[in-house]
Image (cartoon, rainbow, N blue to C red):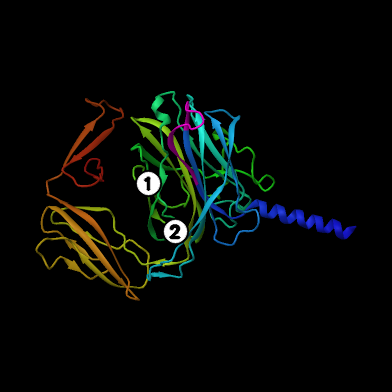
Amino acid sequence: MRRKLLIVLLIIVCCNSSVLAVHIKGGWIYYEYLGKGINDTSKSLYRVSLKVYRDCNAPTPGQNDDPLQLTIYEGNSTTPYSTLSIPLSRIDTMDKKYYSGCLSAPPRVCYNILVYSQTVELPKNSSGYVLSYQRCCRISGLTNVTVPSSSVGNTYSTTIPGTAIDPGFIKNNSPVFAQKDTVLLCHNAHFILDYSAKDIDGDSLVYYYSNALNGGATTTPIPSPSQTTSQFTSIPYSSGYSGSNPFGTNATVNRTTGMIEGNAPSIPGEWVLSVSVDEYRHGIILGTTRKELHVIVGNCSVWATYLPSSYTACKGTTVNFQNQTNVSNIIGYHWDFGVLNSTSDTSTLPTPSFTFPDTGSYKIKLVVDMLGGCSDSATSMATVYPVHAPKVNIAASGNPVFNDSKVSFIASAVNTVGTAKYTWYKNKIK
């Protein structure tokens, strides 16, 4: 009897472990408007698709949901309108095959992408719909998530607009993110990450960081139904990190292009990154689509150059230049300061200085050579202004000034380049 009981307990433990699906590394939902409903022409027909990213290890039984349960809500309602049971359409593998020879010790970057897709007919309503999918759990060891990250779930959602503002808004296609996900960031290195999306309706898109969302738990790995917008909660970020600052460094999202640029974290590992995009038509917001991805930051070195976007100077002043990366193994520098018809506007020094001959704009270029035959380059612009005698205007808060009264002075400078600095003197004494 004891042996039979032990076997049953072991089976239960194994089954629970597989259902947890501790392998999810990102995902997002999108939809297409296909026209009038087929079974009911008063409804709208949409194709709803979902991509779930997981690691490239062989899945254990129960890890790949088939079918997947997607919950649909009307507007702000917390009562589900319906649940879609969507079959697994295919599994795409994105395995980074090419690594630059200028990288040292690059880790493997690989995702299996589970693609789900199905059509649904939805009645026209004023408030639109929320599509929601929740699943536990993420991979273990996420750097910007509290331990254990393998007990933290996922929520993916998007919204379909209603007719409240404009009946034509139901004829909408959500933005589709570019699938450029096999990106490796090297720790401490400058990077540019493409998080752009395309909208076939021509709607205006606005990008921003957003909280990655929790959903599901080790006790309820597949919530049924999934929650809706008002019930979503953020994942527990580690100290120093947040949805709006996922890397803890100066890495920003361009609100217009969706390009993320900045410095990678100093700590190698996997980091949760969540970006939302709002779509606007005629200045009115239609909906929001959000994509999550676990981005790999490797313990590797990237040979690169980085310059400020611009330099300013006055005619006759000397400008100091420096490559602003922390890479090693650079064996050669080649600077060109952009003076036309000149052969003396170059330098091979690591930190050269240069005096521009005249006013105007100059294109600066730096090329660096590294051990192993690698090279990289960066460009910037320098603007040189004419020299004018600076002038300072001083205004006082009181005129006339009475004995023992407090007077405030405000100085403003003209004919200056950059930010003026002021030093005040009393009775010609500093």
* Up-down relation of residue 328 to residue 405 (above or below): below
Which quadrant holds the N terminus? bottom right
Residue type at mark 2?
Thr
Q: Determine if residue 147 is in view.
A: no
Helix, strand or loop under label 1: loop
Res 82 visible: yes
Q: x and y percent of residue 255 in the render?
A: 36, 42
The residue furthest front is 39
Instruction: Identify the mark at residue 182; answer none if there is no mark.
Output: 2
Q: What span is colored magenta in the figure?
A: 28-44
Q: Quadrant of residue 301?
A: bottom left
> What secondary structure is marked by label 2?
loop
Q: Amino acid at mark 1?
A: Gly
Whether residue 351 sits left or right of residue 7 in the image: it is: left
**Mark 2 vs 1: CB contact within 8 A:** no
Which one is earlier in the sequence, the residue at label 2 or at label 1? 2
- Horizontally, is 8 left or right of 205 in the view? right
Q: Which mark is residue 156?
A: none
Magenta residues: mostly which secondary structure?
strand
Q: Position of residue 194 (x, y in %)?
A: 38, 52
Magenta stretch holds residue 407: no
Cα–Cα span, label 2 and label 1? 17 Å
Q: Residues within 10 Å of mark 2 (few under 14, many from 20)?
A: some
- The answer to whether residue 256 is above or below residue 10 is above
- x 43%, y 36%: residue: 33
Q: Is residue 21 above or below residue 81?
A: below
Residue underneath mark 1: 258
